[in-house]
Amino acid sequence: MKRLLLLLPLGLFLVLAAVLYRGLFLDPSRLPSPLIGKPVPSFLLSSTNDSSLSLTQDDLKGSPALINVWGTWCPSCREEHAVLNALAKQGVIIYGINYKDDRADAQRWLKNLQNPYRLTIHDADGSLGLNLGVYGAPETFLIDSKGIIRDKYVGAIDMRVWHEKLEPIYHKLVAENKQ
Amino acid sequence: MRRLSLAFVLMASMYGSNGLAKSSSLNSDDILLQRYHDLTLVLRCPKCQNQNIAESGSPIAEDLRFEINRMLKAGKSNEQIIDFMVGRYGEYVLYDPKLSSKTLPLYLGPVVMMLSGCLAVAAIVSVRRRDRFKGERLLSEDEQLRLISLLNDAAQSSEKQS
């Protein structure tokens, strides 16, 4: 009993060391979104490519998809755009939110760099972005077929992020939808 | 005359109410301004961490300040505004997080650690005190005398050497 008591400080130290060691690999800039598990907030905004076409949250329902928040003013969005083009070619459904941007600039961007988005929502004043808790582009949400947000990624998606983090969840959502 | 005085009273009351409305709106503006300052100080900027949204120059902080201004003017309470922010950006935006099952270790951890430290020190002290008490009876009177003479011899020999 006394011996065990002598081992107690070592045990406590090991527990503390394990907790702190794990802390070394946590990224404090990744914030968990409180919106996970909740539906996409309601909105009524126009399409970036066609200002007469109005879009709502119901237009995003039907199948699992990515919602990518981007802007022409965002440098890392340009790098990400090529990845999104590749994913769209593979058949991944991607919706775009053109966040706090100029419509003409955005249209030119989509014309010159290809358009991976099934629909692009024109969120010029950032109201939808605010309701989604966006704090910097690019951000990407994963939604299921009912329009419920299932995951969120902050930062530019590259192929490594897609394969390691987002693709498994996306395939899970696709499988869920088939059942 | 009566009509004139009535008109005067009406005018005075109009003027009075007008003046009152003005001063009360001025006061409520001051209160709103104060609440705006208070809220922007306690809410944390999601983008530039370790700055509140009053200090931060990032676009998102600007948007959130604008939103707080809009909500205050719409008559929203501080709680409603804070809930709005937490609902979108998470508990993270609060500099003073609410007590919940998630934050409980943070609030109680230091107290628990300090108490267990005090308990450990108290336990060690009481054990040592008891042992010292025992120690006094470990040597018999003869042994005690012999110990003293040995110590004296050692002291003398070291004096000679030096």
Image (cartoon, coloured by chain):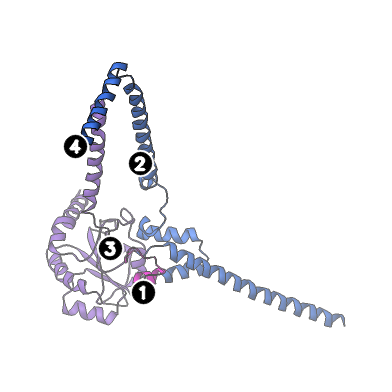
Chain colours: A purple, B blue
Q: Is residue B54 magenta?
A: yes
Mark 3 or mark 1, earlier in chain: 3
Q: Is there any visible trace of residue B90 in the rendered image?
A: no
Q: Are marks 1 and 2 in contact (CB under 8 Å)?
A: no
Q: Is there any visible trace of residue B78 in the rendered image?
A: yes
Q: Are marks 2 and 4 in contact (CB under 8 Å)?
A: no
Mark 2 or mark 4, earlier in chain: 2
Read off the residue under disc 4: B161
Taken as a whole, is the magenta stretch helix, strand or loop? loop
**Residue at screen point 23% across, 36% down:** B159
Q: Are marks 3 and 1 in contact (CB under 8 Å)?
A: no
Read off the residue under disc 2: B113
Amino acid on which the number 2 mark rests in the picture: Met
Image quadrant assignment for residue A47: bottom left
Left or right: B7 in relation to B80: right
Left or right: B56 in relation to B71: left
A19 is higher (above) or lower (below) than B76: above
**Residue at screen point 26% across, 77% down:** A73
Disc nearest the viewer among 2 and 4: 4
